[in-house]
Image (spheres, helix red, strand yellow):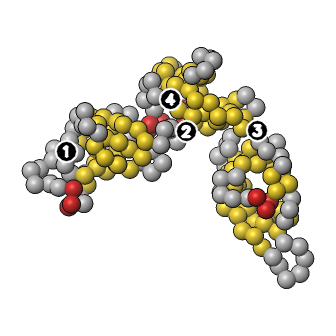
Amino acid sequence: MISTSDFKKGTKILFKGEPYSVVSYQHVKPGKGGAFLKTKMKNMITGLIHEDTFRSGEKFPSPNLEYKEMQYLYEDDGLYNFMDQESFDQVALNKSQLEDVLDYLQEQVTYTILYFKDAPIAVTPPMFMELKITETTPGVRGDTAQGGATKSATLETGMVIQVPLFVNEGEIIKVDTRSGEYIERVKA
């Protein structure tokens, strides 16, 4: 059981039969009456934000979430197929389940898939990914990293990010999947 006193950003609880993640919380102690907690929670299945108030010390069951490492195989008719690395079972997810990860989908890469009641509900890419630049304007001699100027670059997954001027088409770069930002060039 998880008590409201244990709430932190990212704490996962089972509320009204569905898994929720705490987005923010505020402990309130009025002059009269008992303390309570104002929370903002995200439904991990639907993605909707829900606000609620709980008495201090109220308890919630743990949602019994399971994380599995799965390799992305291929896309077929709008279904994205993943394979469990241990049991070799395959699961197909639709585009709406992968909304946040589509810019980072790359065949043969291992992703973390979150399961609730034996059903996949979320996909998380690796923290850093190495992606090839397929299109960008050429760099000009004299462009350096110290200038801080950037240009748009299209990656092999179709994602467009800002990169330094010295980065060229065909090069492989490291991207932070949490923020979608350029980190560094990868030496071939």
Q: Which mark is residue 124?
A: 2
Q: Is residue 26 visible?
A: yes
Earlier-in-chain disc, 1 versus 2 = 2
Left or right position of 166 against 163:
left
Left or right position of 144 against 92:
left
Q: On the image, numbered disc 1 is attached to which residue?
A: 137
Q: Residue 127, relative to residue 37: is it above or below?
A: above
Which is more foreground, mark 1 or mark 2? 2
Quadrant that contains the C terminus: top left
In percent of the image, x 42 and y 46: which residue is there?
176
Q: Is residue 16 visible?
A: no
Q: Which mark is residue 110?
A: 4
Please state which of residues 167 and 159 is positioned toward the viewer in this rendering: 167
Q: Which mark is residue 64?
A: 3
In percent of the image, x 74 and y 44: which residue is there?
19
Please identify the residue farthest to the top as the structure is shown.
Answer: 88
Q: Amino acid at mark 3?
A: Asn
Mark 1 secondary-structure assignment: loop
